[in-house]
Image (tube, rainbow, N blue to C red):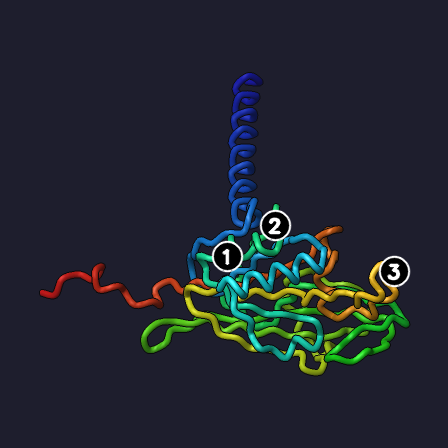
Amino acid sequence: MRAPRAALAAAWCLATAAACCATIAACSSTRTATGPLANKQVGVGLELQRWFVPIDPEARRDGLAKAVDEGLATAVDTRLRSSGFSIYRVRMEKIPAFAAALGGSPQVQRELLGNVTSWSEVEWSRVEDGATVIVSGKPARTGDTIYRLALRGWSFPTVDSARARVELRICRDSSTGTRAVLDATAGTTRLEDVGDGRETVEIAPDEALVVLETPVLASRSSRGAGAEMQGPPTVAALLFAENRIKTKASVLVVTAGFEDMLPVPAAKQPPAR
């Protein structure tokens, strides 16, 4: 009886291992890629891509200027600019070229969010007691604080097409402890919104919304004199600059899926009877 039991146990182990490998492969294919993806999202709701571009602010500044000049991206006039954020609209087919203009991203993290009606945290950074941060265009000196960037949004049909609503929120939490990324409980009453810390943008089915730190360069007279001459960091710099990977700055890209919401092209409609 031992031989059959051993054979059954071995078969069970092999089947379990195969299932685990299949699961891991599926997860990695949806969460990590080797470069920015321009393919349209399947399903309904938001997807978040996180790029990791070179940290050099001068290279990113020049790359953004080139992208705008060449029509790869359109800047969004946002209130978040006063805290160091820039927002751009990018056509889906131009995503790879836009990423290349920023210096490229060797790895891309992808997270399918769906329709998010509660605030979900996407970035956070702790500020030690006594540090100074540029918030809403002004230097702020705070105690031990955690700054957070959260989003929520959803896809919805329109009369002739569909759109996605994307809401961004900058807030701070003076309590202790940290919280996991994309925590659905981020929107609790203990969080305090910063001034000019909310923005709402709608994107079309063929658009992506790109959120990144506005590159800040020291003045020519102070370059080479040390980081202390560049002034306090903005909230965006804390959240995006080397917050996850050294020598890399994070860039957030929000896309949306509109399955069954978009009108069927005339060429694909069934013939009238």
Residue behind mark 2: 105
Residue at image point 66% right, 59% down: 60
**Residue 174 figure quarter:** bottom right
Query: Could you tell me which quadrant the C terminus lies in?
Result: bottom left
Q: Nearer the viewer, residue 129 or 188?
A: 129
Question: Could you say where residue 203 lies in the image, as x and y percent from the top left?
Answer: 47, 70
Label drawn at residue 95: 1
Question: For the residue marked with disc 1, what is the amino acid?
Answer: Ile
User: How far apart are the two marked residues, 3 and 2, measured between alpha carbons?
Assistant: 27 Å
Q: Nearer the viewer, residue 19 or 263?
A: 263
Question: For the residue marked with disc 3, what is the amino acid?
Answer: Gly
Query: Image check: 155 left or right of 251?
Result: left
Residue at image point 56% right, 50% down: 31
Label 1 CA crowd tier, 10 Å (few <14, some 14–19, many 20+): many
Q: Residue furthest left?
A: 273
**Labelled pair 2, 1 in contact (Cβ < 8 Å):** no
In the rendered image, the vertical position of residue 96 relative to residue 237, given as above or below = above
Label 1: which secondary element: helix
Residue behind mark 3: 226
In the rendered image, the vertical position of residue 72 relative to residue 106, given as above or below = below
Of the image marks 3 and 2, the number of the one nearer the N terminus: 2
Query: Could you tell me which quadrant the N terminus lies in?
Result: top right
Question: Could you say where residue 124 lies in the image, as x and y percent from the top left?
Answer: 72, 64
Label 2: which secondary element: loop
Q: Residue furthest right?
A: 130
Of the image marks 2 and 1, the number of the one nearer the N terminus: 1
Question: For the residue marked with disc 2, what is the amino acid?
Answer: Ser
